[in-house]
Image (spheres, rainbow, N blue to C red):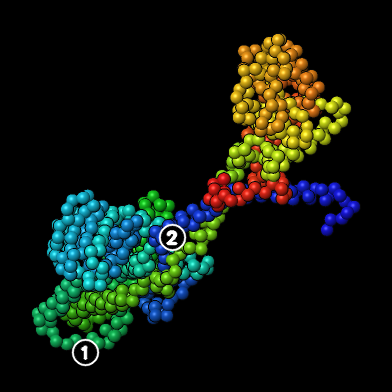
Amino acid sequence: MIQKDKPSDFIIIEEESTNIRLEIEKYLYYWKWFAIGLFLAFIGSYIYLRYTPNTYEVSASILIDDESNGGLPSEMAAFEELGLTGNNKKNIENEIGILKSRSLKERVVKNLDLNIAYYTQGRVRNAEVYKSELPFKVSFFVKDSSFYKTSSKFVISIISDTEFRLSDLEGRPGTTHRFGENINQEFSDMIITPNDIQKKEPNLEYLVKVYPIKSVVESLRNKIEVKLLFKNASILELTLQGALKLKSQDILNELIKQYNKDAVEYKSLIGNNTEAFINERLSLIEKELAKVDISEEAFKTTNKITDIPSEASMILENNSELEKQIIDLNTQLKLVGYMESYISENSNQLLPENLGITEVSINSSSARYNSILLERTRIAKSSGKDNPVIINLDTQLGQLQEGISQGLANLKSKLSIALTEAKSQEQKMNARITAAPKQERQFRDIKRQQQIIETLYLFLLQKREENSISLAVTTPNAKLIDAADGSNTPVSPKPRIVYALAIILGLIIPFVIIFIYFLLDNKVHNQKELENIVKAPIIGDIPKNFGENKIIKRTDRGSIAEAFRMLRTNVNFMLGNLNEKSKTIYITSTTPGEGKTFVAINLASVLAMSSKKVLLIGADIRKPKVAEYLDMTTSSKGLTVFLADQSTEINEIIETTELGNFDLIQSGIVPPNPSELLINGRFDEVLNYGKQHYDFVIVDTAPINMVTDTLQIASKADLFIYLVRANYIDKRLLDIPKRLYEEKRIPNMTLVLNGSDAKKGYGYGYGYGYGYDLETEKKSWFSRFKK
């Protein structure tokens, strides 16, 4: 609340509110441009919404099988003791990179034929149609590398249930074909078959575009977004926006399918290599076992042996443990030899696992080697050889392979020593068997060899079955949580947002334009701007004249008439301290065209209406306009004739005007030396005559900025009216009246603003009930809108 004992605060607040109101009024004057801006913005928004295709968002979520915590699914726990499950820790960022890879997107594009797009032709734009919604099906026979590099367009027009027309976009006449007919194209042969043609509109044309697969893959990579749904989880969300919801769903579902298929193939690499290794070894062992069986048969046939003598049974029982040890050692040596042979013959290949080698370090190193090699293969498929991760993995693989080879060599040496020791003990045992026949010893050697090969053969058969089970239960990387789906409400364009932006732009654009106009505008518009620069008193504000009448009549009640009556009052107030009966008033301006003559004539007219004798002198002898305003004929005897001719009397150049009811001295003929004429002394005689015979002498002078005529005769003025035209003169030119006022080069200087526009908020209006203009009110709304 404003207190009465603080008037300064009240003044400041009132001034600020007035300034804000003036600023608002300046912009409100151009309300029609804001209306036009809003109208055009709404029209543009409607066209944009009408012809912009809707975009739908489709998303799917998958759970990545991340075994980084060491846990196993319940269905895989049964195979843990068989050594069939690895410990591959997956990096979620790597899986995101694989889902974004070009190779995966390329398989999706090829499987769904995404490089072929279909459109219905419209008058403004073509609307895309998914292949499942077409009344026909287009099948290309040859899909080679040249086909996937092709860019082509053609139009299919359905004629009937059995025929269609095929044409291009180059203006050549189309050809008619039957459905099911083989059509030769430049890039591939194709066949078009019908599909629910009767349900479609007749004579509807479909545009078929074949794009290069590379551009389609790149576009798909940019559109599909893969992100981690939760920070501490392994759930990925795949999002795709497109004009066709069904097409986007198929793309995401196919992408997940291809990703899982790729992961299963990677996981099966170890099993497939192990199976090939076991099959190869079984084939060799079968041949060796057959040879041993034949040797046993030949030995028994040659020596006619059917049974072992009973007396050797006790020795064999004591020697059984030693034989078992020798068999185990020979088996291990065979496996070590097979492993060394495989490593030397197959470099950079997955190693067979769980063959039965008793050395734990070799089994763990082989499993780690296979895990790292598999991870390297997967990462290398989506990156280059110079990838730091690939280089690091290659280093680890080399170190592991060297360690495995060294471990096998050490194990082989260890087994050989143990075997030599066992055979030595066997020889000692054989020395004790003196009573055993020679055939028994030979038969035992053959039987031992047979048992070794048969044991290895059965072991490999068991491992092959276990490996087959492992391959059968291989699980994909991703578990589908939510299949691809989305809302039927488009994500763009959104009408509310579009119309809201239209309202904002419809208001901001005109505002910015008007603001720039005000920013660049350097004209004088109102009294406040004038009085801030020139400190002289302002005694009048003449509004802009929209009518045809230039001279005010006694019966006029408009705003201009009231403004000149107000000017008359202020002039009398400014001249009230003069004791002289007659007053001389000079009217000038900075530049031509500011309305000096108009103001001078109408001021003389309103002074004459107050029963005063008024003399108007046209002292602008360089460019006279008084006669033109008063619709009078230019006199051959005017002010210039009197100034130049000493014999001419003043009475001879004075005329009485019919329109203004005041006397007039016209400027006369334009002389070659106007400045010299004004200072030759004759002009003082004119002023003296006027003071003697008239109440007011009004002098219409030349613009100050153009010539020196006005300053030469300025000292004779009782009141100097300096005219400034609103919306016309540059503010920088106001330095001229400012300097004249400060230096007091013009006596009793006052200012009058001419041509102000009250509608723009720069003036205060006139008349207040007296200046109501019926003619302006009767104008049509369109005429007022144009202004």
Front residue of 471 and 609? 609
Which residue: 66% across, 18% down?
Answer: 638
Whether residue 351 is visible to the viewer of this picture, yes or no, is no
Residues at circles 1 and 2 in contact by the CB criterion of under 8 Å:
no
The part of the image, by quadrant, that contains residue 462 is: bottom left
Q: Position of residue 149 (x, y in %)?
A: 25, 52
Which residue: 71% across, 23% down?
Answer: 617
Q: Position of residue 234 (x, y in %)?
A: 47, 69
Name the front one of labels 1 and 2.
Answer: 2
Q: Taking 506 as reference, is 488 above or below it?
A: below
**Circle number at residue 299:** none
The three-letter code of the residue at mark 2 reads Leu
Q: Secondary structure at mark 1?
A: helix
Front residue of 211 and 544? 544
Q: Taking 89 as reference, is 769 above or below it?
A: above
Residue lying at the far right of the rendered structure: 5
